[in-house]
Image (cartoon, rainbow, N blue to C red):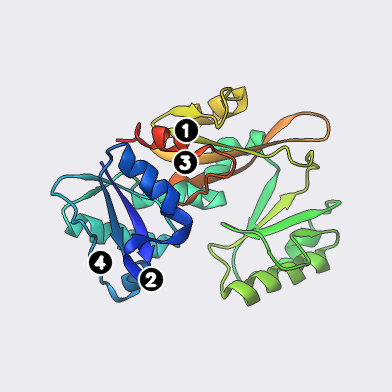
Amino acid sequence: MRILYPCNPLEPKEPDQPFTDEFIAVQQLGIPVSLFAYDDLSFGDFKPRPRIESGEMVLYRGWMFNITAYQEFTDLICKSGGIPVTSPENYAHCHHLNRWYSACADLTPETVFLEKGSNYLEKISNLNWDAYFIKDFVKSNTDAQGSIAHTPEQAVNIINLIEQYRGELEGGVAVRRVERFQPQSEQRYFVVNGTAYSPTSKVPALVETVTERVDVPFYSVDVAQTLEGQERIVELGDGQVSERKTWPLDRFVKMLAQIS
């Protein structure tokens, strides 16, 4: 298996700064790595260095793609002779909330999905919830107003802010019923070929349940505790574009070595 990392735009022979320590640690484990220019992909230019060997499994670690861009990226990997570890279908399954939600609906806050351009005010008003967590299918609002609305009008304003500051609503709008979580209780786990890994030593039963329901080669699972102490899924994500968060570097790269 070869791992692809985006290069530093100013120093093409070096990894982009946020991935430098991981890149070096992976090399030290003897896993083949390559660099490519992320920004050049928009021009269809893909020249990984060193090149991908024919028939080689390829894992990506880097910046997020939207669904269309990831499909184009994997097409380029295939044209280079590689085989993506994560197919476009598997990427979408964990990258977009609406794809994984049905498998885990009982383990995560209740969510309603709205098409882009629909009558948001009417549809959110009909929910009649005490509070609403607003995001598109991938990300929440990073504006100072945050993502929690207490009225349908506030919810619509947050939707508009997401579209204004990010330029698009990826996929559509997700309206989640607010559950109150204990501060600092959120933890990220990773799943590799059906086996869950923890940044410490213990994998919660909730995450093991997810592994039985979500059959994707490499993904992340974020878990938090409610004020009452119940563990709940906050998010699933494609493992290739998920940050390590609290994971010790050596533990994380040893986990990457299990991917094939």
Which image quarter holds the C terminus?
top left
Amino acid type, label 1: Arg
As helix, strand or loop, the secondary structure at mark 3 comes to strand
Residue 127 showing in the rendered view: no
Q: Is residue 15 left or right of residue 154?
A: left
Residue 9: assigned label: 2
Mark nearer the N terminus (4 vs 1): 4
Residue that label 4 marks: 46
Mark 3: amino acid = Tyr
Q: Residue 62: name its quadrant.
A: bottom left
SS of the residue under disc 4: loop
Q: Are marks 2 and 3 in contact (CB under 8 Å)?
A: no
Depth check, mark 4 against mark 1: the one in front is 1
User: Camera-side residue: 101 or 8?
Assistant: 8
Residue 58 circle label: none
Residue receiving disc 3: 219
The reply to whether the C-beta atoms of the residues labelled 2 and 4 are less than 8 Å apart is no
- Residue at the (83%, 30%) spot, across then down: 228
Calculate the distance from the C-alpha at mark 4 to the C-alpha at mark 1: 30 Å
Mark closest to the chain's N terminus, 2 or 3: 2
- Of mark 4 and mark 3, the one earlier in the sequence is 4
Q: Residue furthest left?
A: 54
Residue in the picture at 76% in, 60% down: 124
Q: CA distance from mark 1 to mark 3?
A: 16 Å
Is 109 located above or below residue 142 in the figure? above
Report, in whole angstroms, how far the alpha carbon at label 2 lies from the one at label 3: 27 Å
Circle number at residue 251: 1
Which of marks 2 and 1 precedes in the sequence?
A: 2
- Disc 1 or disc 3, which is closer to the eye? 1
